[in-house]
Every structure is written in structure tokens, then in C-alpha cells.
Image: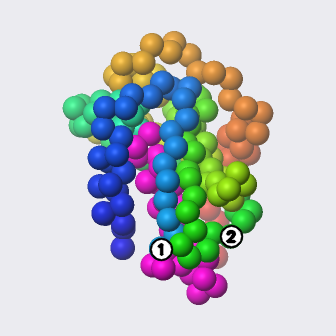
Amino acid sequence: MYPVIRLIKERFRVRGAALALADTHVSRHICWPWDLDPWMELNNGRTLTLYDLGRLPMMIRLGFISALASRGWGLTVAGASVRYRRRIRPFHRFETRSRVLGWDQRFLYVEQSMWRRGEALNHILVRLAATDQGGILTPKKLIAAAGHKEPCSPALPDWVAAWVEADGKRPWPPMAG
């Protein structure tokens, strides 16, 4: 079940706190018993959901959510790559750091990481697409609609550019069987 109460909490914690495109949003979380897998650590699927709960308030603070809602646009995850390094156990408190790295002609690239006591626990690169009824919108259109003046993306880090290139070589549709 999606953690709706956590979502509402995150939504109201960021009221009025604007964020520049280059800034990092920090949210704080607790690993509750219902977040666990059979090995008594944070479930990998719930990790992705908690990243949602870090990304949504960042998008609110950037002005993206109001720009999307006022135009009837949507925002979807169009790809992700996760690296897990340390366990998150029951009742561990941790923070999620979220920031926009840049964009290309189709996608916005967001980096997120979870931290506890100064140690990185896991890391995700998320590719997002703004959409309307006609399909994918350019990130520049969303950025401008949210009131940001950045004319072009900062250079994507080499590791992000390499991921974009590698993912572009991935066959679609996937092979059956």
C-alpha cells in the first residue's frame, strides 16, 4: 500500500519554501516495520517509494507541481538506476537528498541518495518526463512554466551521460522468453 499519510506529511512540510534548480532538497524519514522485507531491512520496492517521497516535495519547491497541475500535464518516471550499498534497519532514521542534475531534449535527470550518520546508504538516478495528451514535453517547457530562467542545462556528469548512452542501446521491446 502506498504511504499516503507520509505523502501528505511531505506535501505540507514544504509549504512556501522555494528551491532553485541547482539546490538540493533534504527530507527525513524513518524505516517503519511495514517497510521491511523478510530479512528485516528496508524493502527495495519501498526504497523506490521513499525516493518518491523525497522527489515530490523537491518538485513542489521547484514550482513544477503547480505548473503541471495548472496545465493538465503529468510527470512520469521514464527510467531509473539504483545502487544499494548499506542496509537500513527497523527504526533507522535517515535523510534523502534530491537534486536536479540537468536535462536533455526529452528528459529531466534527478539524483537522489539516502544518508545515515554521514554515510551514503544507496543512490538513484531517475529520468523524468513531463507529459501532456500529445506525449512527452521538453524539459525546457516545464522549467519555463515553473518560472525558472535557466536557458540550458548544466553539463550532465560523465556517469549520467554514459548511462543515457548505454540505455539508448538497450533493445526495445525486450526479447520475449
Q: Where on the picture, by quarter, is residue 8?
A: bottom left
Left or right of residue 61, residue 72 in this image: left
Q: Where on the picture, by quarter, is residue 155?
A: top right
Residue designated by label 2: 87
Disc 1 marks a residue whose amino acid type is Trp
User: Residue 75's spot in the image, x, y percent?
Assistant: 39, 43
Secondary structure beneath disc 1?
A: loop
Secondary structure beneath disc 2?
A: loop
Q: Quadrant of the N terminus?
A: bottom left
Residue 124 in view of the camera: no
- The answer to whether residue 92 is magenta is no
The label shown at residue 20 is: none
Boundaries of the magenta span: 33-58
- Front residue of 91 and 101: 91
- Front residue of 143 and 8: 8
In primary-sequence order, the first of circles 1 and 2 is 1
User: Residue at left 63%, top 21%?
Assistant: 154
User: Residue 167's spot in the image, x, y percent?
Assistant: 68, 47
Disc 2 marks a residue whose amino acid type is Arg
Q: Are marks 1 and 2 in contact (CB under 8 Å)?
A: no
Up/down of 91 relative to 151, above or below: below
The colour scheme of the drawn protein is rainbow
